[in-house]
Image (spheres, grey):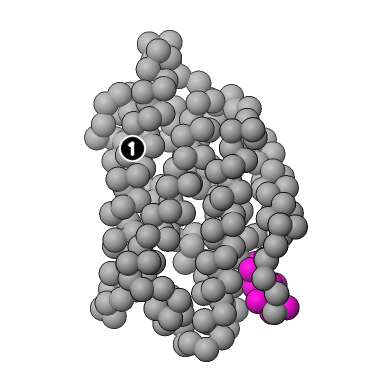
Amino acid sequence: MDSARVLASANARILRAYSRRTIEALRAALPLRLALPHLEPTLALNVDKEVRKDTQVIRRAADCVAAGRVPGPDDLQQLYEASKQIDREFLDRSEAIPVGIVVRYDEIAPVRLARIERLLGSACRILEAFQREAGLRAALRASFSQVDLERLLRELLRLYAEETRLLSHAVRLPTLLIPARETIAQKLLHTMDEVAARLASDLGRAVYHPRSRLD
């Protein structure tokens, strides 16, 4: 079994569920509902690029586990630089939608590096457990208590949300909404935090209760 592929696939389902639930929550909130036609295309493209970035991190974790080594600063820097290439491809695709994005790496770098480091270390831990356990659920249970797993998921999703908030500053909005840009960004972050808490709880139950599903 390709444990890295299994873990990356589960991670992709989590991120897509997070994006879907966020958009559903935004539809119920003003002024976010007014801004949603301008935010939603960015959110949809953003989740695809974050899935690709996370998959690279998980694959690097698998390489480290196979080599019997602990990831170091060089791994973090290489993954960070690789993420910029995915950003460039994202920006090329975003030309077809009404956004104008300049990625401010001085703002984003600390958030992104923190997420890479947390995911890389956690993925190594899970993939090591995968060598002894049968299946993803068993590997997750061997790696974390339910409380710790939910805390990890919330932390990773919070970092995802923070970078999304920073990117939202670049979305073109109608003139009437421009004065509310920062309010919209903060409400977006608040909404994503609430969604993350519920999703983490749901996923914790899915892992620790056999009749639940991970997806």
Determine the image quadrant of residue 173: top left
Residue shown at 54% from the left, 52% from the top: 115
Nearest the camera: 10 or 41? 10
Determine the image quadrant of residue 95: top right
In the figure, 197 relative to 39: above or below?
Answer: below
Q: Report if residue 212 is visible in the image.
A: yes
How many numbered dots are placed on residues in this image? 1
Tell whether position 63 is magenta.
yes
Tell whether position 45 is magenta.
no
Residue shown at 28% from the left, 54% from the top: 198
Q: Residues within 10 Å of mark 1 (few under 14, many from 20)?
A: some
Q: Tell me which amino acid carries mark 1.
A: His
What stretch of residues is rendered in magenta? 59-67
Measuring from the top left, give residue 141's x and y in whole percent.
39, 78
Determine the secondary structure under disc 1. helix
The rendered magenta stretch, by its main secondary structure, is classed as helix
Measuring from the top left, give residue 130's x and y in whole percent.
53, 82
Measuring from the top left, give residue 48's x and y in whole percent.
54, 49
Quarter of the picture containing the N terminus is bottom right
Residue shown at 73% from the left, 47% from the top: 81
Asked if residue 112 lies left or right of residue 180, the reply is right
Nearest the camera: 208 or 11? 208
Residue identified by numbered label 1: 190
Residue shown at 61% from the left, 49% from the top: 113
